[in-house]
Amino acid sequence: MALRRGTREQRTNEQLREQYEIERELADRLRNASRIERGLLYASLYDELFRRVPHHPLVARKSSAEDTARSVASKMRFLEKFLDRDTTFLEIGPGDCVLSLAVSRKVKQVIAVEVSRELAANLVLPQNVQLIFSDGSSVPVPRDSVDVAYSHQVMEHLHPEDAVDQARGVFQALRRGGAYICITPNRISGPHDISKYFDAVARGFHLKEYTCSELAGILKSIGFSSVRAHVRVGRRFVRVPLPFVRLVESAVGGLSRSPVRRLARSRLVSGFLGIRVVAWK
């Protein structure tokens, strides 16, 4: 079977198939679990995935310093405008904490909330970085204690009920006037998990992928006073009115599947479909 492989994907077809089969098996257990059961499963299933798939990108990335530095620099270009020396920064899903460590050099305090002990094993953290483990959806930090919250490629990994719970936990953790930066892949150009090599919809650990319109609606319903969309143009990030993003999503989403994928992944449209929202409390 010929797979459409990204230019950065170095694994064999057999390795991709292995991750797909294991990830589907574990993700189905989450999809079919009750809310209480999911609270116990998130950490154990992700740790199991990383043990059973040692070539998983999130595990292999530890050995690629160049790729890690490039990724962190790209994220910091957007984040820096929200940070100062008095900021308390919350990262949801920090993984190996490389971004949290970079942020810690520019802010007062960093709180990193992670579900997988496997990814965060053997970390040595500075005094102003606190690592907390959660059940996958809760945000166990004091109310009104955070200035800037950030999640990157996290929300899509949660059951839809748990994603709303997590966003509500972020809202409660933020001080009045605080900002939540949420980045997640757009369903219209998906799937974006391992399913992209095999399926038309996400069936792996992306339990639900969203449109920007859907995400903005969720955040507004929780109580955020405003939600702003930002798109990447080259190395810059430009604020774009949500109605325009909705218009693009509606136009592209109304096409049949094959044209959607070609158009959504084109350089012209992909910037508008990448979900990068800032919600203000």
Image (cartoon, grey):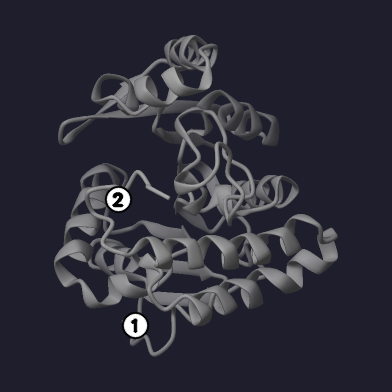
Q: Given the image, on which type of amino acid does mark 2 rest? A: Leu
Q: Is residue 13 left or right of residue 142?
A: left
Q: Given the image, on which type of amino acid does mark 1 rest? A: Leu
Q: Is residue 145 left or right of residue 169?
A: left
Residue receiving disc 2: 83
**Where is residue 107 shown, x and y percent of the image?**
30, 62
Q: Residue at x 43, y 11 (%)?
A: 244
2 up-or-down from 246: above or below: below
**Where is residue 245 shown, x and y percent of the image?**
44, 17
Residue 68: name its quadrant: bottom left
Q: Is residue 111 left or right of residue 49?
A: left
Q: Nearer the viewer, residue 8 or 111?
A: 8
Q: CA gap, disc 2 to disc 1?
A: 20 Å
45 up-or-down from 240: above or below: below
**Where is residue 162 shown, x and y percent of the image?**
71, 52
Q: Nearer the viewer, residue 261 or 214?
A: 261
123 up-or-down from 194: above or below: below
* Mark found first going from the N terminus, 2 or 1: 2
Disc 2 packing (10 Å; few <14; some 14–19; many ≥20):
some
Q: Residue at x 15, y 36 (%)?
A: 235
**Where is residue 152 shown, x and y percent of the image?**
43, 51
Q: Residue at x 34, y 29 (%)?
A: 265
Residue receiving disc 1: 125
Disc 1 packing (10 Å; few <14; some 14–19; many ≥20):
few
